[in-house]
Amino acid sequence: MCGIVGYVGGQCALDVVLAGLRRLEYRGYDSAGVAVPADGGLAAAKKAGKLANLEKELAARPLPSGPTGIGHTRWATHGAPNDANAHPHLDNPGRVAVVHNGIIENFAALRAELAERGHVLVSETDTEVVSHLLSEAFSSCGDLAEAMRQVCRRLEGAFTLVAVHADDPDVVVGARRNSPLVVGVGDGEAFLASDVAAFIAHTREAIELGQDQVVELRRDSLDVTVTVTTFEGKDAEVRPYHVDWDASAAEKGGYDYFMLKEIAEQPKAVADTLLGRIDAAGSLSLDEVRIPGPVLREVDKVVIVACGTAYHAGLIAKYAIEHWTRIPCETELASEFRYRDPILDQRTLVIAISQSGETMDTLMALRHAREQGAKVLAICNTNGSTIPRESDAVLYTHAGPEVAVASTKAFLTQLVACYLVALYLGQVRGTKWGDEVRSVVRELSDIATQVDEVLETMEPVRELARSLADKGTVLFLGRHVGYPVALEGALKLKELAYMHAEGFAAGELKHGPIALIEEDLPVVVVVPSPRGRSVLHDKIVSNIQEIRARGARTIVIAERGDEAVRPYADHLIEIPATPVLLQPLVATVPLQVFACELATARGNEVDQPRNLAKSVTVE
Ligand code: M6R
């Protein structure tokens, strides 16, 4: 949450920072601001609302520019989203400017202490204390990086901080604890950002910052030096890496919204996630999972932790893991996990699923699991992010950058990764024969084409969505792996269309939810294949009849050729036939398109729904 950019180099810092903020706006859009040391002083501007408001302000009252600058786009935690609480925050003389992502837990005590020393704080934020503390520390040591180290040692909580000082105008300093910050290293220039997307147009060379580290970007004649130290001032190990996607991947590419582009990219994302993980003989090769075979053979319980859409991927993974490996598996909301004192030991494998790799609830859950001796495997889409770094092993999804707040291609690739892990466990533990593994792998390899087929038949779904734009409620029903798909369909609709949407296990209908059914209420039903476990199919057909008899308007997602449901479907959305366990990979796609179109029809911001942020870095 919150996007941060810092720049040092030969270009106009203000332009680079604003372009970076545009790429990070998905992280928060309650307000935006910039600061640049210039003409011996510090110039700053900030505005509530989206970045466009700040840009208007800068067009009306331009700031001078120099070679260094910082910027921020906010997702409000402490204090309302107004101009005063927007970042950057300055000290009283207006010489230092700070932007921040995270929460400073001891800010109230620090604020009281500063007030006693005569500082006047003008916002309700926790951040402002940092600018005042930095100002004091800089006055005594004259070095911004050292001042930052001194201040960070006093802070509690999670934070990324980036600062500039009018008296050291060629320097930008950053610090991180439990919150993301990456360094971009260009030719004669360097960047700090919450996410590589902010500087990918300039460089693909990056440096990961570790926990409790301070980084200084210092401009010296034509070069920029990057120095990384710990909060204690010791030299820190620098871990450079190359970003394997380019600027075009972070552009809309002709689509109206990132979400539409990301939905369309799903066939490729699915195929890319399988790439290199299947050997010439068609078997699984996951050498990158560095947990040794003997350890995996000892595992007697799997626990999956995740949030939101990633949690739904975890719910589906449970079916595959238990079916293919016969190891008991629980899927748990990361935010609940550590507070219930879960039973974990060396034989527990915890799988942490996260697109961003920065979700605080998931990070805290995995830390708790490791403290109890469990092994943690991360499934993640963001190279070098905190969750994979703190895990014992990682399986990266290759979805490419996902910018829209609503997760789509990340979800499908998380599912693919979960299936791969489940099969791999089966392979290593011998609960799946080689030819069985190869057969599922072949079926997985067909999915990209099937998702493509689904995407080509979405016009009636869009039309249906538009016709429902004035409805207040939509319900979603599913059974078996269709149940988490129903939950995911409801989540998409809530976050994008701001409608009351609920997902239920269809078998639960008679235990309460059926009371909600009334005339013309849209109910989306995800129908399992009539092949395979036909008992599930028959039961859900009865459920459809029950709700239809009570007036529901049934929107049925069913396998092509499933004639048994046709008479009961007011709207039939046909999907290709897949094995039962893999059906979520195709069944979810119409629900994404449905939610996106409904949001558009209701005039909502598709990529940046209200109150949300892409990456939730606070608990
Ligand atoms: O980055 P993560 O996968 O850890 O994020 C988890 C959730 O915040 C995320 O899936 C969220 O629910 C999405 N906005 C849903 O579309």
Image (cartoon, helix red, strand yellow):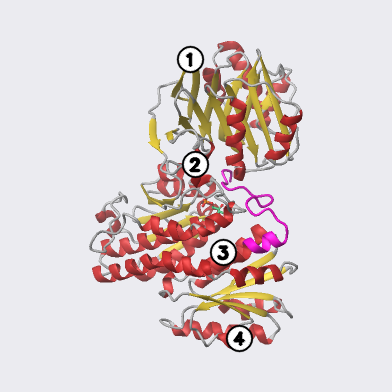
Check residue 568 in the rendering and tell me which mark sits there, or answer none: 4
Q: Is residue 271 visible?
A: yes
* Disc with the residue nearer the chain's start (1 vs 4): 1
Image vertical order of residue 162 relative to residue 241, above or below: above
Q: Determine which quarter of the picture holds residue 274.
A: bottom left
Q: Which residues are magenta?
A: 596-619
> How much space separates mark 2 and mark 1, taking CA atoms?
28 Å
Residue beneath disc 2: 247
Q: Quadrant of residue 137?
A: top right
Which badge, 1 or 3, is on the more N-terminal residue? 1
Find the distance from the CA under tag 4 to the CA under tag 3. 23 Å
Mark 3, residue position: 488
Does the Cβ of the disc 2 residue fall within 8 Å of ligand 1? no
Q: CA distance from mark 1 to mark 3?
A: 51 Å
User: Taking 117 as reference, is 301 above or below it?
Assistant: below
Magenta span: helix, strand or loop, mainly? loop
Q: Nearer the viewer, residue 550 or 247?
A: 247
The amino acid marked with disc number 4 is Tyr
Instruction: Indicate which label's residue lies in the foreground, 2 or 1.
Output: 2
> Which residue: 62% across, 31% down?
71
- Front: mark 1 or 4: 1
